[in-house]
Amino acid sequence: MFVEKTNVSKYIEKLTQTTKILKYKLKTDT
């Protein structure tokens, strides 16, 4: 249970970072 929770938070963290990077790239491209 605990391990699953940590994996999910890590995944969400990764997703958030990817979104930030994508938004930044979009911003710089335009």
Image (cartoon, rainbow, N blue to C red):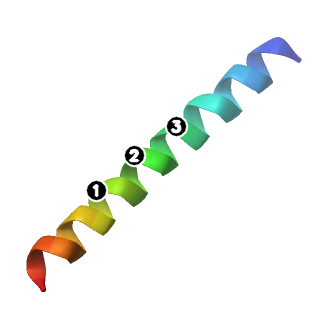
The amino acid at mark 1 is: Ile
Under circle 3, the secondary element is: helix
| Disc 3 from disc 1: Cα separation | 12 Å
- The residue under label 3 is 13
Residue at the spot x=89%, y=18% of the render? 1
Q: Residue at x 19, y 68 (%)?
A: 25
For disc 3, the neighbor class at 10 Å (few under 14, some 14 to 19, many from 20) is few
Image spot of residue 19 (x, y percent)? 41, 59
Residue 17 relative to residue 22: left or right: right
Q: Residues within 10 Å of mark 2 (few under 14, many from 20)?
A: few
Image: 19 above or below 26: above
Residue 17 is tagged as 2
Quadrant of res 29 = bottom left
Query: Quick check: marks 3 and 2 in contact, CB under 8 Å?
Result: yes
- Report if the CB atoms under discs 3 and 1 are less than 8 Å apart: no
Q: Position of residue 4 (x, y in %)?
A: 78, 25
Specify the amino acid type for callout 2.
Gln
Cα–Cα gap, marks 3 and 2: 6 Å
Whether residue 1 sits left or right of residue 6 in the image: it is: right
Between 12 and 3, the residue placed more toward the observer is 12
29 or 1: nearer the eye?
Answer: 29
**Residue at horizontal 66 percent and vertical 27 percent from the top:** 7
Q: The C terminus appears in which quarter of the rendering?
A: bottom left
Quadrant of the rendered structure where residue 8 is? top right
Residue position marked by numbered label 1 in the rendering:
21
Q: Position of residue 26 (x, y in %)?
A: 23, 76
